[in-house]
Amino acid sequence: MILIVDDLVINRKLLRVTLEAAGHTTLEAADGVEALQILAREAVDAIISDILMPNMDGFQLCLEIRKNDRFRALPFIFYTSTYTSPDDMKLAQAVGADKYLTKPAPAVAILEALREAIEKKSARPAIAAPAIGDSSVLKQYSQALVHKLEEKNTELHDTVEKLQRAHERILELNSGLEQRVKERTTELETTNRDLSLALSQVKQLNALLPICGYCKKVRDDQDYWQSVEGYISQHTDARFSHGVCPECFELHVKPDLAKHGITGVRSPAQRKADP
């Protein structure tokens, strides 16, 4: 029976699958306190434990086991992803660990470490407990905890800075977006006003226009009379060029030319029709 000690469920599951695939049975604990409770009622052949855990970490768990006459020779393996420095490895030896593995380790390495730890137990029926009161062990343990706390504080500080930068970037983007929305809204309002004015002008041209029966001037909305050309030019983009229609040419232009002795002149429409 192998006791797996880790505060993360996924870590315990992965390790359990590895061990059970090799024919081992397993028990699980979320921290050192729960592990000691299981040891008090279950027969365990070895322990594979994480180090960084709440309530009681792996270092303290190993010390408690090595102080206990009943469990003193129990094979103990550290399996960690946080305590990986050379000093951490020395402390693991100082508290009595048999093996030290860094996550993630191949299944072969885990099973080989377990086999060696169990064989080591048979070769030493009784293991001397580490001097829990030894100042050097306590000093190493305290330094390891302080170092890990500093690392976590640094990680937290870096995370806070990243979140702050992300927050500032979001505010910057929002500000830019608001400005673009305001500019676009202003553009749309201007366009709508121009369109409304254009539609109004079109409606005026489509409306019933008062026109003088004699001079053919048009009366506008301000009650002013102006030429048809002037009115249309004011309300549209149209431009005018003057010419003479065929009927007016025959009725007016041709007689006027004949009075001055000019004959045989054809209208522009007649000239255009020539082959």
Image (cartoon, rainbow, N blue to C red):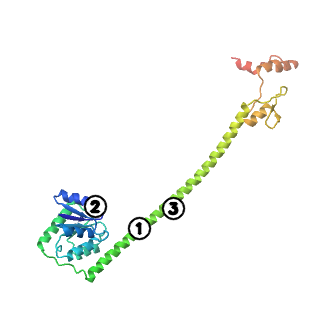
Given residues 125 and 259, the one toward you in this image is 125
Quick one: which residue is furthest to the front in this view?
41
Q: How many marks?
A: 3
Name the residue tied to disc 2.
11
Provide residue 212's location: percent of width, then percent of height: 83, 28
Image vertical order of residue 208 relative to residue 153, above or below: above
Q: Using a 10 Å C-alpha cutoff, classify the residue at mark 3 as few (fewer than 14 neighbours), some (14 to 19) or many (20 or more).
A: few
Q: Quadrant of residue 266?
A: top right
> Is residue 238 visible in this depiction of the protein?
no
Do the CB atoms of the residues marked 3 and 2 lie less than 8 Å apart?
A: no
Q: Please state the horizontal and vertical placement of residue 132, each as a whole percent of the image.
A: 24, 80
Viewer-closest of 129 and 171? 129
Residue nearer the viewer, 134 or 72: 72
Quadrant in the picture for residue 104? bottom left
Left or right for 82, reference 254:
left
Amino acid on which disc 3 is placed: Glu
Q: Residue at x 28, y 69 (%)?
A: 51
Q: Dot 2, how many residues are within 10 Å of its Cα: few (below 14), some (14-19), or many (20+)?
A: some
Query: Would you say residue 117 is visible in this rendering?
Result: yes
**3 or 2: tag closer to the N-terminus:** 2
Name the mark on residue 156: 1
